[in-house]
Image: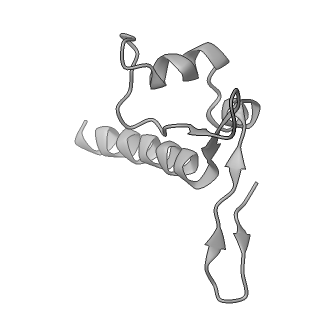
Amino acid sequence: MSNISTTSGSFIPRIVRIKTVMQMTGLSRSSIYEKINPKSSYFELHFPRPISLGSSAIGWVEHEVQAWINQRIQDRQTREDCA
């Protein structure tokens, strides 16, 4: 599950579907949809927004999901350091 590197050193973002986001985050399908729904009490402003892949399909940019996970880890470490 990594982005594809090009010969110039840049990368092509990878789009992942809901099952992969569930595996990456450990969250359930409903929890993910709650986090992206602004009307939900579980809405999370910094959770990655999905992108449209067609009329009834969405996906997430893999490195954005990974960045969200990394931020959660960093936040935990910061809280532990302050305790």
- Farthest bottom residue in view: 8
Residue at (53%, 50%) from the top-left corner?
Answer: 64
Relative height, residue 21 to residue 27 (above, below): below
State the image quarter where residue 60 is shown.
Answer: top right
State the image quarter where residue 38 is shown.
Answer: top left
Across and down, in percent, residue 51 comes to 57, 41
Horizontal relation, residue 56 to residue 63: left or right: right
- Say which of 49 and 35 sits in front: 49
Across and down, in percent, residue 81 comes to 29, 45
Horizontal relation, residue 42 to residue 67: left or right: left
Quadrant containing the C terminus in the rendered view: top left
Residue at (72%, 60%) from the top-left corner?
Answer: 2
State the image quarter where residue 76 is shown.
Answer: top left
Residue at (74%, 37%) from the top-left corner?
Answer: 20
Quadrant containing the N terminus in the rendered view: bottom right
Colour logic: one colour
Relative height, residue 32 to residue 39 (above, below): below
- Say which of 23 and 47 sits in front: 47
Across and down, in percent, residue 43 comes to 39, 20
- Farthest left residue in view: 82
For the image, the number of numbered tags is: 0
Relative height, residue 40 to residue 68 (above, below): above
- Say which of 77 and 33 sits in front: 33
- Farthest front residue in view: 55
Residue at (36%, 42%) from the top-left corner?
Answer: 75
Across and down, in percent, residue 74 comes to 40, 48
Relative height, residue 10 to residue 14 (above, below): below
